[in-house]
Amino acid sequence: MKITHGEDPVNPGKSRTRIQSVTRAARILMSIAQSIDGHSASEIAAQFDLSQPTAYHLLTTLADEGLIAKDARRRYVLGPSASIIANAVSQQDILPDRYLALTRKVAALTGETVYFTAWRGLQICVLETIEASHALRVAAETAGFSKMTHTRASAKVLLAFASDEVRDRAIADMTFEKVCPNTITSEKAYRRELAEVAQNDLSYDREEFSPGVQCVSAPVREGGIVIAAVTVSMPASRYETEHVAIERVLREVAGGADRFAR
């Protein structure tokens, strides 16, 4: 069993111990989860630079646990046990320590109100909020399911990187109500905005939900999959002078959080 040690990207100075076989199995599971058509054993071996026997043993172990399954085409897809994990995650509203640390780090570096948002089932939910340290600040977002999602920077991130099916379903449910003068009020304009988010890896609420408030949101990934968004919310007057620094912090902290990219 090979064990490696490395620094935690969210908590510099703290080391992490990793078991190579577990890391490989987790990455394989994430890859299969991302694939519409599943993977063959040879594709997994090539993707992760593994020998055929090693790939086969890892896949067999995951299949024995029900996390993946082999279909009639001899391709590996998600198995029934994977749904247990998915359902459990969708029901919990407690933010894991490493994501809480990430949220606190962004708040400390920016001094602004920061919130962490993720999918819960097919709904977008605010899991954690940290209020700004400035005297002039944006009120903290209440934890819970987001409303008026067409106005939210965090929702734009999650939908920009969602599957076509999830994105289409969410947009179909939107009323595109005009909340503020800058609110996006058409599906065409909203889809165009999501395409820009997917390209730039940042999304914006330009006083679309609340007058005088601007937000910037960045994706949080695991294994290359966007699983959450971290958002900075601030007075529009301060955004004009601070947005470059805010965006840099978001890219560095949120972008460096993917454990599977290491």
Image (cartoon, rainbow, N blue to C red):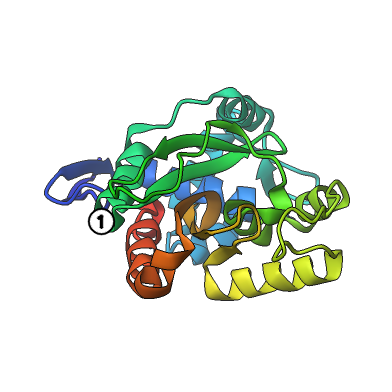
Quadrant location of the N terminus?
top left
Q: Position of residue 220 (x, y in %)?
A: 47, 53
Q: Is residue 227 above or below residue 87?
A: below
Q: Which residue is mark 1?
A: 109
Does residue 208 appear to the left or right of 222 in the view shown? right
Q: Quadrant of residue 191?
A: bottom right
Please give the name of the residue rendered at 69% of the width and 45% of the height, measured from the top-left corner. 77
In the rendered image, residue 123, in percent from the top left (x then y), is placed at 69, 37
Residue depicted at x 61% and y 30%: 90
* Label 1 Cα crowd, 10 Å radius (few <14 / some 14-19 / many 20+): few
Question: What x and y, as percent, mark residue 48?
Answer: 45, 61
Q: Is residue 213 visible?
A: yes
- Residue 39 visible (yes or no): no
Which is more toward the observer, 244 or 213?
Answer: 213
Amino acid type of the residue tagged 1 in the rendering = Leu
Horizontal and vertical percent for residue 136? Answer: 36, 51
Above/below status of 46 relative to 72:
below
Q: Residue at x 72, y 61 (%)?
A: 183
Compare residues 252 and 62 and report the one nearer the observer.
252
